[in-house]
Image (cartoon, rainbow, N blue to C red):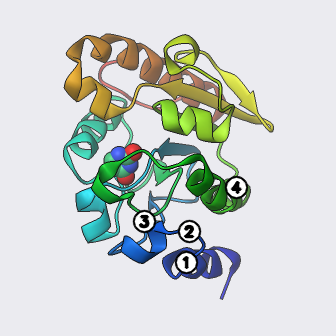
Amino acid sequence: MNNIESLTQEINTCLKCPLGETRTHAVVGDGNIHSSIMLIGEGPGFYEDQQGIPFVGRSGQLLNKILQACGFTREKDVFITNIVKCRPPKNRDPTPQERQTCLPYLYAQIEYMQPKIIVLLGATALKGLVDSNARITKMRGQWLDWQGHLVMPTYHPSALLRNPQLKRPVWDDFKQIVYKYRELVDPNHFSKYC
Ligand code: URA
């Protein structure tokens, strides 16, 4: 068993915090762990918990559309995961302690994957990875450095579903991601829209 297989097994059987007792499935991640872009959300919701796959509900469908517009596919070009790997009951925010307990799994995924670009989807991802006092409204759209990785915070797709006015800034952020991808990974990367 290699590193990533044993990590996956560890996450799937984890009982380090109370979320392990109420989950249906742990949600390790989806996509290509050998790609250059890691997307990090908050935590699994109802459908993700049922299926063991991140971003399969309404916000996942919107995320798929955004990725498509950028010319990226979920299967090949990105790896998607979350700050916490198990669903908080009733979709409440994960507590600071649950985040803290789960973070070593994310660190291990980042260490293994070595993504060129990390996209933080929403406040929980930003606070969880970068700084618990950071504000998504202030930090979105700006490249940050996190331990040598380039990080772009943007709004969570569920925020866009609640407030369509956020579509514009999120699209601006994803355009920056496409430009950076061309610079760092594939100068010929094609996107119809940017
Ligand atoms: N929202 C998230 O933050 N992550 C998921 O996996 C699904 C919805």
* Residue 186 makes an appearance in the image: no
Say which label, 4 or 3, has the lower sequence index.
Answer: 3
Residue annotated with mark 3:
27
User: Which label was assigned to residue 15?
Assistant: 1
Mark 2 to mark 4 CA distance (whole Å) = 17 Å
State the SS at label 2: loop
Q: In this view, does 65 lie above or below 183?
A: below
Proximity of marks 1 and 3: CB atoms separated by less than 8 Å = no
Quarter of image, res 98: bottom right
Q: Could you tell me how far apart the alpha carbons at marks 1 and 2 are, in whole angstroms?
A: 6 Å
**Dot 1 or dot 3, earlier in sequence:** 1
Q: Nearer the viewer, mark 2 or mark 4?
A: 2
Mark 2 highlights which residue? 17
Counting residues from the start of the chain, the first of labels 1 and 4 encountered is: 1
Q: Position of residue 149 (x, y in %)?
A: 73, 37
Looking at the rendered structure, the secondary structure element under dot 4 is helix
Distance in Å between CA atoms under marks 4 and 3: 15 Å
Q: In this image, 141 relative to 63: left or right?
A: right
131 with respect to 48 (left or right) = right
Q: How crowded is mark 2: few (under 14 residues within 10 Å), some or many (20 or more)?
A: some
Up-down relation of residue 162 to residue 73 (above or below): above
Label 3's element?
A: loop
Badge 1 residue CB within 8 Å of ligand 1 = no
**Amino acid type of the residue tagged 4 in the rendering:** Tyr
Look at the numbered disc 1 and give the secondary structure of its residue.
Answer: loop
Cα distance in 3D space between marks 1 and 3? 14 Å
Residue under label 4, please give it: 107
